[in-house]
Amino acid sequence: MNWKRWVLILMILSLPLLTTGCWNRRELDKIGIVTEIGIDRGENQQIVYTVQVIIPSGIKRAEGGSSGQGKSTVTLTSSGPTIFDAVRNLTEESGRRLNYSHTMVIAVGADMARDSVLPVLDFFVRDHEMRFRTWFVVTSGKAADIVKASPSIENISAKNLKLILKDSDIVAKSVAVDTLEFFNEITDESLQAVLGRVEVENPQAENRLKLSGAGVFRQDKLIGWLDPMKTRGYLWVRDKIKSGIIVIPCPGQEDKLISLEIKKVNSSIKPYIDEGKMKYRIEVSVESTVGDQMSNKDFADPEAIKELEDAQQKKVIEEITPILEEAQKNLKLDILGLGEATMRRFPKEWQQMKDNWEAEFPNAEIELQVKSKVNHTGLISRVKMNK
């Protein structure tokens, strides 16, 4: 074997040494993994920046069932004239470089949101570590309180809140929006944004979090709130209801209640021109099944089913009507998407309307149509429940 062959063999054997490892690797004990962020407006227009940072050793003890009292996370706070400055100032307290690639939730306090959420979105949209699908929420109090809240089930409160937002469609009384979706909505000239509201429940006791309706934005500024039921009406109109429960009185036995589980919803806004005037028809189609009933009425025959479907239709109309009035009479703001529907269906007419749309929206003529269907209505084994 000549020397050239030996050199070739040595080069081949050396290749694994050059390809293993990661040149920009960061050790876990050198970085802080941020799971949740809270941003508030402080004194003298300072930005108050609060983060929840994972303590790997605390998580290991919690998952391993150790009897130690190690915490899973720690909360850090800093301030500065801008968000970027406040982020850098946080390093003085943490002693670690913060990593945002695992951030689950960004919360904005009401004072900051009333001024503008654009600085918040601008910073995180530019940040290469931040994921656009991070949940984005607003609170009527301080965002720092959301970050500091105690988890109810998970050992990390940010994960707990993430799961609450992810499963919010089961109840359908709040809005779950990620950073990208919210950014698109506040920059959309045909639509005003609505953002999920998170509040601290029992701050003097358990200090747990709950979803509580939504915040309403005019462009980038918070201007008002929707309670859970008006938020549900908003979800009906915007075709954002995937599940939920409709509770109605039993037809013919109004003192007894029936729970209907929503299985399928289709909602749409249909603009049309009538005698030269733009009008709107909101069409909602809902299918449900009987979840439980407190009466002994048998809904097996077609007439009884029709009564049940009529009762469901009436209830859905009752849930939607308040948000129509709220948007047109109180907020005077198109959070319903009428402008968006007009832009898509009548783009030429929209170009003529859009500059004056905010003034025209409160007087827009809206018709509501609800189609109702109920399946699986029979009593279990036809057993009478009043024995």
Image: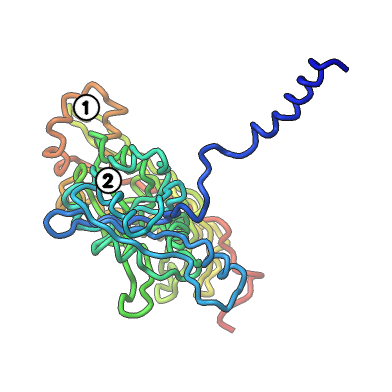
> Mark 1 or mark 2, which has the lower sequence index?
2
Residue 193 vertical placement versus 13 (above, below): below
Q: Secondary structure at mark 2?
A: helix
Q: Position of residue 26 (x, y in %)?
A: 50, 46
Query: What's under tag 1, amino acid-wise?
Result: Trp
Q: Position of residue 327 (x, y in %)?
A: 21, 49
Question: Disc number at residue 317?
Answer: none
- Extreme-bottom residue of the structure: 387
Q: State the image quarter where residue 90 is shown.
A: bottom left
Q: State the image quarter where residue 384 is shown.
A: bottom right
Query: What's under tag 2, amino acid-wise?
Result: Phe
Quarter of the figure with the N terminus = top right
Q: Residue 147, can we see it? A: yes
The residue wearing badge 2 is 84
Q: Position of residue 56 (x, y in %)?
A: 52, 61
Q: Residue at x 48, y 66 (%)?
A: 72
